[in-house]
Image (tube, coloured by chain):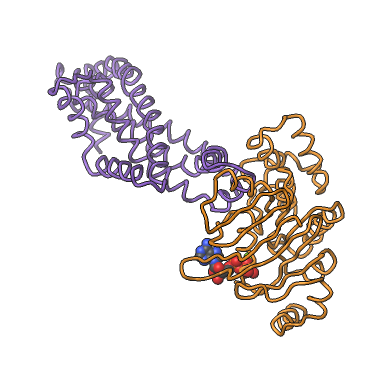
Chain colours: A orange, B purple
């Protein structure tokens, strides 16, 4: 078990957004998170890499790192947690004053201070992997949304995380650009990356996931294999949600 | 009308024309030795001060935000001329005698520091939160995020308003003549005190300021056009 999350809670002011989240992520597995707007999916991902600090709960990683959020957390552990996962944002959030290549090398070169030649090779390989070997020296505003998102994926991969987090990576894209980004994610799945993906693309979720998790109102309502959750949900709320997405 | 009568005075009076030409060089010297270095040095130190102040104000520690706020409020709430007099005459009386030129630098830097800090603070705040978060997810600390991701973007946003501050500063340095700094305007005052040709000499000084500011505004336009290209 790569990560086990127990009793995760998060509130903004007096609004409880994550109420009692328990989940496990296996190494090499892909977890997709689905659920209606406002159910807490983004907040869950953000808690997983400490962009938001959970109020309560425990993370246990297979390398022995344990974080108890009701207690004080050492800065060092927080940094370790953050570097365990790479985040791909819905709105890309590329650095606009840096080229595609510079966006990718920023983490490994500046923060992790790895060897420059090795980082350059890694960055070129990653950009090639996401199909942008001819766009390395372009700035974000010179790229399409789909290309920007693929740079975002390469940037997240470059810190060599153990877990990749995707928050609706295609929902800001024009329909004809979605395919390229999904293909990159599928390639990563085939390479054996561990990933957690928030998405509304249920067909895609069915193809790539090992587990699907349905959230509503801050709770995990149902989780299981894609076939069970997407084709044969046992909870009424899951059924309604899937029906609404499939036949809008 | 005004210009006509000026031209009339000049052309009708060759002595006036000679005076205009003869005082041009001393005034330009005043600009080169006084106005321009005063502006450049004060602006540079002022911007550094502004950056520190802006970062202090954005912090979440009261012991940093409060001094920064008091400083900005005090400078913005008092006349520049009064600040200049406090630094030069006031500190002088207390035994901290500072020469006119450095006194002016201190006062102008403090001034730029306060006004520009508001510009810089606003431009830092204008950078989307997602940029901070993206920096954090690649592992950057607060300082690294600020230096490598936020400030370069904020700099672009703040260049147009800061170039206005710069141009205003060129004109404001004329106040230094009142604490005896020999800059452009002081030169014109000195010559006028001898010749009593107030109108001619002060208009000449005004023209020189205008030329400097006009050139600067052309530079400003160029810079802004280049910035347009990068953004979008
Ligand atoms: N920083 C914040 N401050 C206050 N409230 C927040 C904050 N972030 C999220 N929320 C609230 O938490 C709830 C869950 O938000 P979240 O973004 O996690 O939902 P989501 O499932 O990702 O929705 P969507 O599908 O629309 O992206 C919402 O009601 C939202 O308004
Ligand atoms: Mg969301």
Residue B203, horizontal then vertical, whole percent? 25, 29
At 29% from the left edge and 27% from the top edge, which residue is drawn?
B106
Count of numbered tags: 0
Nearer the observer, A45 or A55:
A55
For the view shown, which residue lies furthest in the left direction? B93
- Which quadrant of the view contains residue B44? top left
Quadrant in the picture for the N terminus of chain A: bottom right
Residue A91 lies left or right of residue A184; in this view the side is left
- Which quadrant of the view contains residue B86? top left
Residue B146, horizontal then vertical, whole percent? 52, 41
In this rendering, is residue B30 above or below A109? above
In this rendering, is residue B27 above or below A132? above
Residue A107, horizontal then vertical, whole percent? 66, 40
Residue A24, horizontal then vertical, whole percent? 72, 62
In this rendering, is residue A132 above or below A221? above
Nearer the observer, B162 or A42:
A42
- Which quadrant of the view contains residue B187? top left
In this rendering, is residue B191 above or below B6? above
Quadrant in the picture for the C terminus of chain A: bottom right
Nearer the observer, B153 or A40:
A40
For the view shown, which residue lies furthest in the right direction? A190
Nearer the observer, A232 or A22:
A22
Residue A80 lies left or right of residue B55; in this view the side is right
For the view shown, which residue lies furthest in the front direction? A64
Residue A131 lies left or right of residue B198; in this view the side is right
Residue A243 lies left or right of residue A77; in this view the side is right
């Amino acid at each position: 078990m790569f990560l086990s999350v127990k009793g995760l809670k998060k509130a903004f002011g007096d609004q409880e957004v994550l109420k009692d989240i328990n989940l496990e992520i296996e190494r090499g597995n892909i977890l997709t998170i689905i659920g209606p707007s406002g159910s807490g999916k983004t907040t869950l991902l953000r808690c997983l890499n400490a962009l938001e600090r959970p109020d309560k709960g425990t993370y246990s990683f297979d390398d022995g790192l344990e974080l108890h959020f009701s207690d004080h957390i050492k800065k060092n552990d927080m940094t370790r947690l953050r570097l365990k996962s790479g985040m791909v944002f819905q709105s890309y959030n590329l650095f606009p004053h840096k080229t595609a290549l510079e966006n990718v090398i920023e983490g490994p070169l500046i923060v992790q201070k790895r060897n420059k030649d090795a980082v350059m090779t890694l960055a070129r390989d990653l950009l090639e992997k996401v199909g942008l070997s001819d766009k390395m020296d372009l700035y974000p505003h010179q790229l399409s949304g789909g290309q920007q998102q693929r740079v975002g994926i390469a940037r997240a991969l470059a810190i060599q995380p153990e877990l990749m987090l995707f928050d609706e990576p295609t929902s800001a894209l024009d329909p004809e650009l979605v395919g390229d980004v999904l293909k990159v994610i599928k390639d990563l799945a085939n390479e054996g990356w561990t990933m957690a993906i928030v998405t509304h693309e249920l067909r895609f979720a069915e193809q790539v996931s090992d587990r699907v998790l349905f959230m509503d109102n801050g709770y995990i309502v149902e989780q299981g294999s894609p076939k069970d959750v997407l084709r044969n949900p046992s909870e009424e709320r899951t059924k309604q949600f899937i029906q609404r997405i499939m036949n809008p | 009308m005004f210009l006509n009568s000026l031209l009339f005075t000049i052309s009708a009076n060759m002595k006036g024309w000679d005076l205009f030409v003869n005082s041009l060089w001393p005034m330009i010297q005043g600009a080169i030795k006084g106005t321009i270095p005063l502006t450049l040095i004060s602006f540079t130190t002022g911007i550094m001060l502004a950056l520190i102040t802006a970062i202090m104000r954005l912090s979440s520690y009261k012991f940093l935000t409060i001094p920064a706020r008091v400083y900005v409020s005090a400078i913005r709430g008092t006349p520049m001329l009064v600040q200049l007099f406090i630094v030069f005459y006031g500190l002088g009386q207390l035994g901290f005698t500072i020469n006119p030129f450095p006194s002016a630098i201190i006062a102008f830097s403090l001034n730029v520091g306060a006004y520009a800090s508001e510009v810089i603070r606003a431009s830092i705040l204008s950078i989307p939160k997602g940029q901070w978060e993206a920096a954090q997810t690649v592992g950057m600390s607060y300082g690294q995020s600020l230096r490598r991701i936020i400030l370069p973007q904020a700099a672009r946003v703040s260049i147009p308003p800061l170039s206005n501050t710069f141009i205003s500063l060129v004109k404001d340095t004329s106040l230094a003549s009142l604490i005896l700094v020999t800059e452009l305007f002081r030169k014109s005052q000195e010559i006028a005190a001898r010749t009593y040709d107030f109108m001619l000499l002060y208009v000449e000084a005004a023209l020189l300021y205008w030329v400097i500011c006009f050139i600067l505004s052309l530079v400003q336009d160029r810079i802004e056009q280049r910035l347009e290209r990068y953004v979008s």
